[in-house]
Amino acid sequence: MKEKINEYLDNRVKKEEVEELLLDKEYAFYYEDLKKMKEGLRELRVNPPDFVSKLRIVERKQMVFRYSFAFVMVLVLVFGVWFSMKFALYKELASKQTEITKQFKAPPGMGIMQISTEETIKVEISKSDLNNLINSLQKIATLKSKDEKNGTYVFEVQGKNISEFLNSIENFHSAKILENSLKDKAIDTNLTYQVTLTILIK
């Protein structure tokens, strides 16, 4: 009999076939309980095609997100490598530029770098006056190196100070210039001259 009630709720039999059964309290309670249970199941039931469709949409969105994220990460990586290469190249060029700049000096108001020229002067002087001469020249020029054993002193002289440098040697009471590569040479005040002073003791 209970199967008949179940079939009625599933619309497989007519109402007339169960009316008499429902007059019985036991079957009436069974009918109400079974009806509520079936209605609850209908509410919970998911339409399979709709569920699959929604699942595919979610999966598609997740896939788009994953690919988008991967693409962004690749761009970040490529940009990072490019930036590192540019930075390394910039440092190398800056280092070379600094090295070149040390060898050249820019004249006032001009963008052209001028390399220093090397000159030689040979002087004969008494031993007692040598230190006084070197000290007086150091007030005008920069002593870069010296070899007292061989009697050579290397000075760096600004072009504008060449005349004063030469006059200090010529006017020194016991000094005599034997050779001078700067003699009769036009002096460029924008240049830096490297002058090697060779000393001969009288």
Image (cartoon, rainbow, N blue to C red):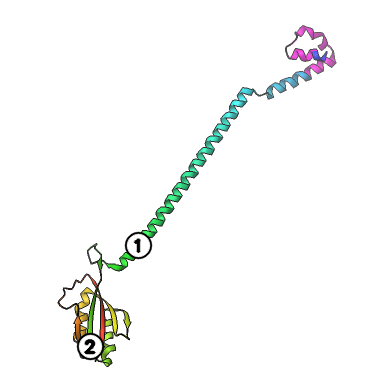
> What SS does tag 1 mark?
helix
Q: Is residue 78 visible?
A: yes
The front one of 14 and 168 is 168
Residue 96: which disc? 1
Quadrant the N terminus occupies: top right
Identified at 26% across, 83% down, the residue is 198
Numbered tag placed on residue 150 in the rendering: none
Pinpoint residue 140: horizontal percent, then vertical percent.
25, 80
Q: Position of residue 62 (x, y in %)?
A: 56, 35
Front-lying residue, 72 or 84 = 84
Name above or below for residue 21 compared with residue 64: above
Q: Mark 2 — residue? A: 124
* Left/right of residue 61 with respect to residue 28 in the rendered view: left
Residue 140 visible in the displayed image: no
Q: Quadrant of residue 180?
A: bottom left
- Residue in view at x 53 percent, y 37 percent: 65
SS of the residue under disc 2: strand
166 displayed left or right of 48: left
Tag 2: amino acid: Glu
